[in-house]
Image: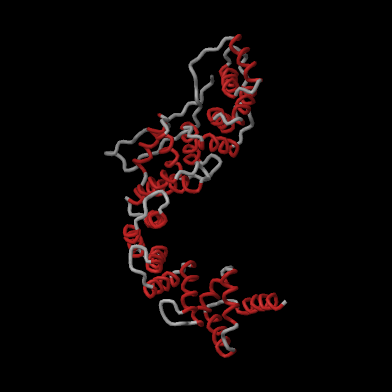
Amino acid sequence: MISIVITLLAAFCSLQNSTTVPLPGVAAAAPGTETSLSSPDVTRLRAQAEKGDAAAQYQLAEAYQRGEGVTQDESAAAQWYRKAAEQGNSDAQNQLGVMYLTGHGVERNEAQALAWFHKSARQGNGAAMFNLGAAYYNGNGVGTDGARSYAWFLLAKQAGNTNAVNAVQVAELQMKPWEIVDSYKDLASMYENGMDLPVNQAEAVRWWQEALKGGDVDAEIAMASRLISGQGVPQNFSEARRLCKEAAQKGDRRGVHCIGVLYERGLGVPPDAKKARESYARAAAMGDAASARTLAHMEETGTGGKVDRMAASIDYARLAAAGDKDALDSLARLRKEIDSKDWNKLISLLERIHIDTAKLENQLAVIKSRQTQ
């Protein structure tokens, strides 16, 4: 078969002579076989392929691509790769992606190439993972993204792709520590959300923990959340609290919110509504919407402190202005309990913080009208 070779176009520079070490310039890789096919072999393969045998379809495509036992025909190769790829053959999916990337046998189409690489990579195909790493490095069909490129190279290496070993080594010589941590976070998210890879909570935890070693605040929050919920790891509230405190000390509002949750629910600490309310107030002041919602409810009900309907109304109004419909409903409920004098005072306060009070009044009027019908 005509192989598309991955070359390391950039050599390693001497670290003694240069502070910059270039990444490998890479192209897509294609799987290959050493089997030589005769014309009768191709005839037998064709019979199996026409019956829908995906493995035979793939081998027949290779025969056309190499010109073994049949006249070389890349267009026919692409057609048979497609048939096998549509049946889920990961090698065929990867090879079809290669053909789209290079314009061999099909019109060049980087978007199609990426789509087929992704299908193949989801099945654990190391070559496809490497090709995605190359795509993100070269900017083929996507914006260049060093962290995502390195993430795919790591996966390809883990899957046994030999080309990825060199790519990982070269990348690590140039990448800054925080960039490598970003790659770990990418991998964790990929395993969490199931978009690029099948959902795998154990692998997500593994990569979050790698990111955690670099002191990354996103990793601290992600692992704290998992330690609280027990998702992928045993519950450990004391460790979750430690991570949340570290994040909070770095000025991360999610860490402050997390501390509020732990005190509110009594997870690893005695329940303390006052401390919870204080933490939610801090996080809300930092712009955390979830904290603002809980704080408003605590202010409205007097949980963890005094009843403060004005403060609750301001919090609900801010959330409503940001599009929170539940907060708007809560504000409509509170409106009934606030006299005209205090309501006018509230409107004045809201105008000072640049909330469109005319729009807010109209929205509340709509809710009131709907409730009276």
Residue 318 appears at what percent x and percent y? 53, 74
Quarter of the rendering containing residue 351: bottom right
Q: From the viewer's perspective, is 156 left or right of 56?
A: left
- The answer to whether residue 174 is above or below residue 44 is below
Residue at far right of view: 373
Q: From the viewer's perspective, is 209 left or right of 318?
A: left
Q: Which residue is drawn at 58% across and 38% down?
A: 115
Q: Which sits in the foreground, 169 or 139?
A: 169
Q: Can residue 142 be seen in this view?
A: yes
Q: Residue at x 49, y 29 (%)?
A: 29
Picture quarter with the N terminus: top right
Quarter of the rendering containing residue 116: top right
Q: Which sits in the foreground, 57 or 167?
A: 57
Q: Which residue is drawn at 51% across and 45% down?
A: 194
Q: Which sits in the foreground, 30 or 307?
A: 307
Q: From the viewer's perspective, is 177 left or right of 131?
A: left
Residue 175 appears at what percent x and percent y? 37, 45
The colouring scheme, among rainbow, by chain, secondary structure or one colour, is secondary structure
Picture quarter with the C terminus: bottom right
Residue 259 appears at what percent x and percent y? 37, 66
Q: From the viewer's perspective, is 131 left or right of 359?
A: left
Residue 230 appears at what percent x and percent y? 40, 53
Quarter of the rendering containing residue 20: top left
Q: Is residue 10 visible?
A: no
- The answer to whether residue 170 is above or below residue 350 is above
